[in-house]
Image: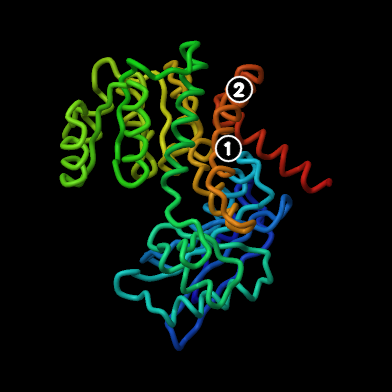
Amino acid sequence: MTDVSDGVLHTLFRSEQGGHEQVVLVQDRSSGLKAVIALHSTALGPALGGTRFYPYADEAEAVADALNLARGMSYKNALAGLDHGGGKAVIIGDPERDKTEELLLAYGRAVASLGGRYVTACDVGTYVADMDVVARENEWTTGRSPENGGAGDSSVLTAFGVYQGMRASAQHQWGDPSLRGRKVGVAGIGKVGRHLVGHLLAEGAEVVITDVREEAVRLITERHPEVTAVPDTEALIRTAGLDVYAPCALGGALNDASVPVLTAQVVCGAANNQLAHPGIEKDLADRGILYAPDYVVNAGGVIQVADELHGFDFDRCKQKAAKIFDTTLEIFARAKSDGVPPAAAADRLAEQRMAEGRRA
């Protein structure tokens, strides 16, 4: 690594976005591995978070991403009621070109060298099969296949948790948790979005979808002819009569262009980092739009991978994920009492739990 910008160092040591306990830079010349492992907090237990494999523009961008993602995992894990802090790792490179068994094994050894302070799992660019390889060198690996003692795909419980958050949002906004008859727009119908559509239809919601992949849209509409598809997210957020908008694709969905034209009264989706920049949460509140913080409602997946460490039990995980309903309502109540947007209330609750963990 040749250079780390002053901005990254400021984030790590001096800004409110920092406070990380440990950042490890990893290099293995024989396999080509270059990685950053960031541990934001272990106040509640070993840091837990996935491994992102991505072709960053430079090393400074990779470090910054690891820092931001690790901090977000601390907050997510705290509000999910897990005895875990937040951590994240990023591997620098193109997963389609650079990912090899040798590299993944080297990465596993790097994580193992932390002695259990960091528990890894899947993220963008890494999959269950990759975690099976990493686990050969590192016992602190989750997100493995059922054949290798893991829980496999976490999208089922991620979608279930978002659905619970959406029900809580309906309860707060309209006084009834039922989504029957509500018009819900889902942007992004990958693994999580597809399962979410299933929950909504089962309850009797009217569902509108969009996705950049035509094949994904076709699979849904052929199976569920009652679902309406629109060309793009721009059309979806402007849909007349939309009650709930569920961003389930890329981050930054709530921005200066989308918020002013959003027709929905509730935003609750699976995508990470939906707020494009600080201040957007206030713009939503000023328009009377209820925002369910993404890291609260999409925590079903991390609940699942955390459970692997204790011998995976799907029913036990589903019961924990169902509590996202109560946590979301608690955040809305705190937001109202404190006179702040729900995103700020969620941060305060997470910080309170982490502070209590440090004192324990």
Residue 64: tell me if it is visible.
Answer: no
- Point out residue 13 in the picture as x, y percentages from the top left corner: 66, 57
Picture disc at residue 216: none
Position of 1 with respect to 225 (left or right) is right
- Point out residue 222 in the picture as x, y percentages from the top left corner: 16, 37
Picture mark count: 2
If you read the primary sequence from the N terminus, does the residue marked by circle 1 or circle 2 appear first? 1
**Residue density around tag 2, few if under 14, some if 14–19, many if 20 or more, within 10 Å:** some
Specify the farthest residue to the top.
175
**Residue density around tag 1, few if under 14, some if 14–19, many if 20 or more, within 10 Å:** few
Label 1 vs label 2, nearer the camera: 1
SS of the residue under disc 1: helix
Specify the farthest residue to the bottom.
30
Q: Residue at x 54, y 54 (%)?
A: 305
Position of 147 with respect to 194 (left or right) is right
What's the amino acid at mark 1? Gln
What's the amino acid at mark 2? Ala
Which residue lies under the disc numbered 1?
319
Position of 32 with respect to 135 (left or right) is left
- Point out residue 247 in the picture as x, y percentages from the top left corner: 36, 36
Depicted 135 relative to depicted 166: above or below: below
Depicted 323 relative to depicted 216: above or below: above
Position of 155 with respect to 38 (left or right) is left
Q: Residue at x 38, y 33 (%)?
A: 254
Q: Residue at x 41, y 27 (%)?
A: 267
Check the image and tell me how it is coloured.
rainbow
- In space, the residues marked 1 and 2 are separated at their CA atoms by 25 Å
Q: Residue at x 41, y 79 (%)?
A: 101
Residue 76 vs residue 340, the one in the foreground: 76
SS of the residue under disc 2: helix
Which residue lies under the disc numbered 2?
335
- Point out residue 316 in the picture as x, y percentages from the top left corner: 59, 43
